[in-house]
Image: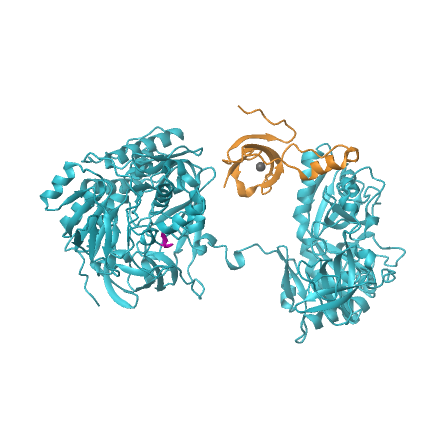
Chain colours: A cyan, B orange
């Protein structure tokens, strides 16, 4: 175990009484509570953390926060997590991690942690708890408004945490205490606001136990997503320092100047022993002075500006530090770590650290996501907010205001304006700390230094160099959006936080245009990486999507049914016996339905109760066939089309009374049909007096099918005359079945004699058991959806949504008979006169028989005309929509949509399956009992 | 996630609503009287403006009422909300 040789003797916001052990890249180290993985590594002299993704160059810790472009790590233990930045991983005892070359590895074990979500509403949301954000929150909270403050760090204070501003830090502590004590205020630390959506809807992720490692309490969710709807938002998201493009600017030991200042002040860590500073602006001088005080030697300060304020030169001269105005870096010596720095003109300075400040970028990501515009401020050399339609204000360095006094004043103003806009009288916040500040001289506007563009890096994580950007502009690209996509600059985990503006600057430099005219790329959520587990929250496993089950579900489970999902419903698929596979079970179930008696739970069928004096008028307008002529007591099959004439749904219509119908729909489309009816009633025909209600879950439905079904029904319903003349096909009767009030419909979806028994949902099990008991002497067999599909397909009955796809008319299905010629209009009628719906080569529904009598065609298989495939493109005739083994036919068969199919009956076509073309013969769609002799038993 | 002011329920989250496309596209009173081109225009042609757009929304997870909205398609700002059958309001 190594010592922490680069730890200061005292100072920092770490707890030196709580040493923590950790392992990085296989070596053991110690750090302190309050460290990040990055600060603990630096304390142990480790700069290099990874190898770059494309070029394999050594890379080190470059920043001190969420903007870190280089130091990606994979956490191995106690909980595996890929692609975190070492600068944001809080150190805990037992942490095991290793450096990553750009790509992480997902854990193979399921994530045992819990994730959660919270919805909240507030008057004012403040994003960022630095000086501006806390000033805003302090005023807003004092007004009595409901305030939420989120900040991604482990404690409030923002950039102040990286300084030695004792008075300001005392103020931070007082404001934080005020906010915690205020019942209307929620201060959330370790919480990153990552998405800003319409109408002030901000989404944040709170990391609750990540920093506790193995000691995280199991009852707490690991992370939770906050979905916050705010009347006003104050963005105090700060600024990120940026780098410059110069030769070998990616070497370990090169670090943003402000980051080095944070390591010294916040973590008590020396990022090196001897530093060269390269800067375009004043901020690096304050960093240099803090490093000097902590014991880091400053070899030289190279300032790109032709002259530097004597204020700084004198202060540094007092400390024996030379300031060279008008100087840049020519090259950097050392691959694994900086060993010396050569300035323009050739002077070489020995150093293990090169601090860079190329200027500051206000963090405009959330503002841009909100639709805010960004404007280039030539004095600041960065993009600043410039107007947004949302109720949002930007304060502090996020607004391009860099001094502490300015940030505090602007935050106070923004907080006051926000609460006043929500109807509160602004209160008085904590008294602001005095800020002693030096006058600022304008920064230099330099992006690229002279040198070898192939080793001048713009985006460190994506290994994008000035040379690559020149290649992009050389191809004629003039937009940063295009350059971004061509070079991938700004597309890594950090989304170009430190490199985005530099990319714009380099493009402008290469094109010789003004960076303000060029603009930036658009920012999109998420601002910072967020795990899928957090986004999923509790919506995992069984809770991922609602599952609907029928009243008989427990019975189906207890009796060995396998299930399939139909829409949100779980339906019995088949009931295997004694090790049967699907094929064997379905053949057995089909045989029972065709030869004896079988029964199925059909409760999932959509059911809509349509009532009112104009109910028949509505149905006449929606169905292609006439419904108003239906007699009470009778049932009619119907098809609904969209205005374009394509089939939308089908089902039966039962007339219960002159002014009342029960409409059934396909299982998956029940909600869609109800929506369809309500849409027309509300928006097109508000004069119709009709009401529609879903009764799908009020009625349980049991299908009783087969030549012997009448015997079973006769046993169960002694009051009902079941002979064919008394109870003909497509009629219904209210009666008592097995002692239960029931509605019995003579409907068949198999071609066999069949009934649908409808009872109250809560009576379903009693009826089902009675049916099974009554049918037992006849060998009654339960069947599932697979058998239902085979039986209906043998009869050529289409399933809407399986044999049709939104491009199929009733005529395409050979159902011309269902399209009324008498009605003046119905939805879709006009489209049947369009040239397109009359084309002779439209796809028709036909049957297919594989010539070998054995091959089961896969559903979706294409069909072609020729015996051997020509060069592509191969003309397609159509495709297989349904395909099954048939017990009744003793062979496999299929339904298909084929161009001009009805004119091709008897012809042979081919289904290319892998390397083989399977010959099949086209038939009519009805392959079983085409005369319909079995319907009446 | 837009906050949509349902005229019956008040402002509610976008996730409670169902989108219904362009408003004021009435089903023709006599489709048979239309030429193929006129009918195709009704079926297949809708406006796609950059800026204010009158469109239909249904509060499907609550009151289930259809209503009309004028929304700026650039900013998602809702400029007006009005009931079915009412004319599109004139906006300043
Ligand atoms: Zn509503």
Residue A795 position (above or below residue A373): below
State the residue lying farthest toward the right.
Answer: A725
Residue A697 visible in the snapshot: no
Left or right side of A651 for A543: left
Q: Position of residue A145 (x, y in %)?
A: 37, 34
Q: Residue A158 colored magenta?
A: no
- The residue located at (16%, 39%) in the rendering is A312
Tell me the quarter of the image containing the C terminus of chain A: bottom right
Q: Position of residue A42 (x, y in %)?
A: 23, 58
Q: Position of residue A543 (x, y in %)?
A: 53, 56
- The residue located at (22%, 43%) in the rendering is A169
State the residue lying farthest toward the bottom.
Answer: A578
Left or right side of A31 for A463: right
Toward the viewer: A376 or A177? A376
Left or right side of A311 for A431: right
Toward the viewer: A166 or A426? A166
- Identify the magenta region: A461-465
Q: Main secondary structure of the magenta part?
A: loop
Please identify the quarter of the rendering in which residue A365 is found: top left
Residue A537 position (above or below residue A431): below
Q: Position of residue A378 (x, y in %)?
A: 32, 34
Left or right side of A576 for A229: left
Residue A397 position (above or below residue A798): above
Please identify the quarter of the rendering in which residue A212 is found: bottom left
* Image-quarter location of ligand 1: top right
The number of discs equals: 0
């Amino acid at each position: 175990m190594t010592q922490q040789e680069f730890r200061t003797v005292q100072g920092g916001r770490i707890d030196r009484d709580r040493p923590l052990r950790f392992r990085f890249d296989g070596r053991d180290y110690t750090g302190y509570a309050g460290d990040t993985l990055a600060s603990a590594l630096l304390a142990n002299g480790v700069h290099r953390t990874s190898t770059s993704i494309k070029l394999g160059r050594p890379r080190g810790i470059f920043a001190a926060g969420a903007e870190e472009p280089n130091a990606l790590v994979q956490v191995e233990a106690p909980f595996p997590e890929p692609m975190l930045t070492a600068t944001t991983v809080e150190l805990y005892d037992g942490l095991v991690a290793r450096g990553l070359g750009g790509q992480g590895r997902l854990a193979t074990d399921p994530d045992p942690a819990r994730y959660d979500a919270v919805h909240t509403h507030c008057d004012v949301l403040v994003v960022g708890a630095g000086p501006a954000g806390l000033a805003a929150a302090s005023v807003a909270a004092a007004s009595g408004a409901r305030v939420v403050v989120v900040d991604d760090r482990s404690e409030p204070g923002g950039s102040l945490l990286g300084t030695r501003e004792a008075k300001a830090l005392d103020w931070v502590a007082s404001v934080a205490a005020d906010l915690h004590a205020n019942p209307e205020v929620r201060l959330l630390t370790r919480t990153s606001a990552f998405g800003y959506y319409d109408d002030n809807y901000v989404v944040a992720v709170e990391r609750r136990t990540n920093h506790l490692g193995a000691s995280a309490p199991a009852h707490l969710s690991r992370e939770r997503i906050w979905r916050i709807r705010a009347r006003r938002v104050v963005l105090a998201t700060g600024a990120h320092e940026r780098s410059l493009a110069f030769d070998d600017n990616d070497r370990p030991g090169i670090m943003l100047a402000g980051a080095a200042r944070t390591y010294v002040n916040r973590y008590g860590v020396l990022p090196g022993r001897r530093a060269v500073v390269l800067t375009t602006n004043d901020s690096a001088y304050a960093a240099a002075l803090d490093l000097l005080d902590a014991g880091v030697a400053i070899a030289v300060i190279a300032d790109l500006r032709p002259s530097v304020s004597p204020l700084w030169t004198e202060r540094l001269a007092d400390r024996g530090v030379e300031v060279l105005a008008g100087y840049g870096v020519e090259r950097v010596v050392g691959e694994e770590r900086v060993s010396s720095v050569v300035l323009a003109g050739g002077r070489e300075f020995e150093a293990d650290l090169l601090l860079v400040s190329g200027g500051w970028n206000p963090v405009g990501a959330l503002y841009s996501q909100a639709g805010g515009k960004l404007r280039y401020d030539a004095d600041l050399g960065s993009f600043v907010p410039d107007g947004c339609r949302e109720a949002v204000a930007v304060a502090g360095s996020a607004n391009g205001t860099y001094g502490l006094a300015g940030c505090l004043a602007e935050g106070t103003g923004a907080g006051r304006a926000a609460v006043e806009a929500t109807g509160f009288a602004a209160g008085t916040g904590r008294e602001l700390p005095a800020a002693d500040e030096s006058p600022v001289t304008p920064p230099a506007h330099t992006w690229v230094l002279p040198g070898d563009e192939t080793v001048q890096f713009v985006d460190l994580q994506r290994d994008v160099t000035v040379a690559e950007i020149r290649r992009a502009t050389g191809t004629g690209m003039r937009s940063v959006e295009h350059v971004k996509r061509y070079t991938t600059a700004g597309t890594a985990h950090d989304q170009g936080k430190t490199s985005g503006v530099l990319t714009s600057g380099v493009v402008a430099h290469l094109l010789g245009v003004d960076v303000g005219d060029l603009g930036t790329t658009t920012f999109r959520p998420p601002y910072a990486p967020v795990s899928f587990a957090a986004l999923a929250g509790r919506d995992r496993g069984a809770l991922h999507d609602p599952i609907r089950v029928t009243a008989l579900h427990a019975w189906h489970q207890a009796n060995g049914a396998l299930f399939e999902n139909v829409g949100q419903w779980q339906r019995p698929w088949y009931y295997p016996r004694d090790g049967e596979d699907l094929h064997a079970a379905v053949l057995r179930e089909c045989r029972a339905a065709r030869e004896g008696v079988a029964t199925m739970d059909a409760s999932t069928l959509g059911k809509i109760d349509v009532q009112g004096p104009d109910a028949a008028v509505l149905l006449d307008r929606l169905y292609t066939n006439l419904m108003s002529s239906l007699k009470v007591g009778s049932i009619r099959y119907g098809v609904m089309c969209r205005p374009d004439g394509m089939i939308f749904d089908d089902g039966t219509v039962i007339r219960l009374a002159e002014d009342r119908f029960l409409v059934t729909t396909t299982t998956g489309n029940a909600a869609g049909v109800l929506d369809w009816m309500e849409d027309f009633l509300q928006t097109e025909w508000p004069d119709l007096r009709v009401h529609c209600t879903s009764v799908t879950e009020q009625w349980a439905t049991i299908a009783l099918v087969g030549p012997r079904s009448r015997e079973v029904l006769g046993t169960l319903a002694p009051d009902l005359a079941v002979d064919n003349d008394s109870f003909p096909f497509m009629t219904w009767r209210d009666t008592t079945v097995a002692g239960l009030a029931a509605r019995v419909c003579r409907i068949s979806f198999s071609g066999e004699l069949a009934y649908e028994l409808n009872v109250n949902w809560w009576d379903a099990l009693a009826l089902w058991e009675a049916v099974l008991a009554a049918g037992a002497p006849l060998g009654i067999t339960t069947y599932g959806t697979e058998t239902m599909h085979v039986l209906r397909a043998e009869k050529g009955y289409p399933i809407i949504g399986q044999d049709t796809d939104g491009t199929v008319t009733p005529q395409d299905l050979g159902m011309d008979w269902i399209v009324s010629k008498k009605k003046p209009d119905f939805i879709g009628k006009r489209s049947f006169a369009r040239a397109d719906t009359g084309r002779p080569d439209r796809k028709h529904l036909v049957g297919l028989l594989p010539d070998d009598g054995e091959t089961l065609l896969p559903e979706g298989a294409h069909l072609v005309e020729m015996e051997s495939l020509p060069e592509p493109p191969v003309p397609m005739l159509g495709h297989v929509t349904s395909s099954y083994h048939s017990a009744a036919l003793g062979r496999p068969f299929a339904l298909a949509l084929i161009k001009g199919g009805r004119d091709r009956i008897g012809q042979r076509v081919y289904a290319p399956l892998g390397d083989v073309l399977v010959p099949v013969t086209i038939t009519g769609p009805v392959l079983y009992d085409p005369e319909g002799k079995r319907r009446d038993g | 996630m837009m906050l949509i002011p349902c005229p019956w329920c008040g402002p509610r989250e976008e996730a409670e609503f169902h989108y219904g496309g362009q408003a004021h596209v009435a089903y023709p009173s006599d489709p048979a009287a239309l030429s193929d081109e006129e009918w195709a225009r009704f079926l297949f042609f809708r406006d796609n403006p950059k800026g204010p757009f009158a469109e239909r929304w249904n509060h499907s997870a609550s009151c289930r009422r259809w209503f009309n909205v004028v929304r700026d398609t650039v900013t998602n700002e809702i400029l007006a909300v009005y009931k079915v059958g009412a004319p599109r309001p004139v906006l300043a």
